[in-house]
Image (cartoon, rainbow, N blue to C red):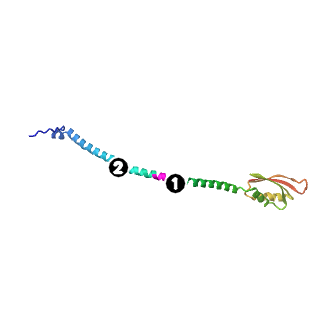
Amino acid sequence: MPKNNAINLLPGEEFEVSTLGRILHWAMGTFRIIVIVTEMIVMGAFLSRFWLDAQNSDLNDSINIKVAQISAQSSIESQFRGLQTKLAIFTQIAQNPTPSQKVANITSKIPPDVTLSGLTISDASIAINGVSNSEAGISQFISNLEADKTFKTVNLGQLNSSEINPSQTNFSINITY
């Protein structure tokens, strides 16, 4: 009979029937399954890395293309912003009436018996000096000025008789914009 030199560290059938043998047999099977599942998860993570690298590369290429497009259009955008600034300044200037428009606006409101003797224009106000044959003419002139919505305030400054002609009345009016 040939000699069998194989060594078996686990005892035979008596050990498999004992509690310790059954626990050891269950643990060996369970750990084998755990190792297989772990290897499958590691392989899945390793293979998904290629897909994630390709996606990352595509995103980087897309970002580089968009950066190039934005930098190519930067000069157009700076010109556009410059034009917007100039238009904003122009509209602000266009909304403010010029001195000639202010004078035309005031002279259109003068009644027939009122004559202007002086007109001083500043940025936010106008001082008017004039002569009238009647106080009703001055009152009508002030009413016409107050009816204009472009003026903030219309104030009668001085009112006195003329030294040269006592039948005339000198007046001054201050207007603010």
Q: Which residue is mark 1?
A: 69
Q: Residue at x 54, y 54 (%)?
A: 72
Q: Position of residue 48 (x, y in %)?
A: 36, 49
Question: Circle 1 — which element?
Answer: helix
Looking at numbered disc 2 in the image, what kind of residue is underneath it? Leu
Q: Is residue 21 left or right of residue 113?
A: left
Q: How many marks?
A: 2
Looking at numbered disc 1 in the image, what kind of residue is underneath it? Gln
Q: Residue at x 21, y 38 (%)?
A: 20
Q: Is residue 167 left or right of residue 100?
A: right
Question: Circle 2 — which element?
Answer: helix
Q: Which segment did they paint magenta?
A: 61-72
Q: Position of residue 32 (x, y in %)?
A: 26, 44
Q: Residue furthest left?
A: 1
Q: Residue at x 40, y 51 (%)?
A: 54
Q: Position of residue 122 (x, y in %)?
A: 76, 51
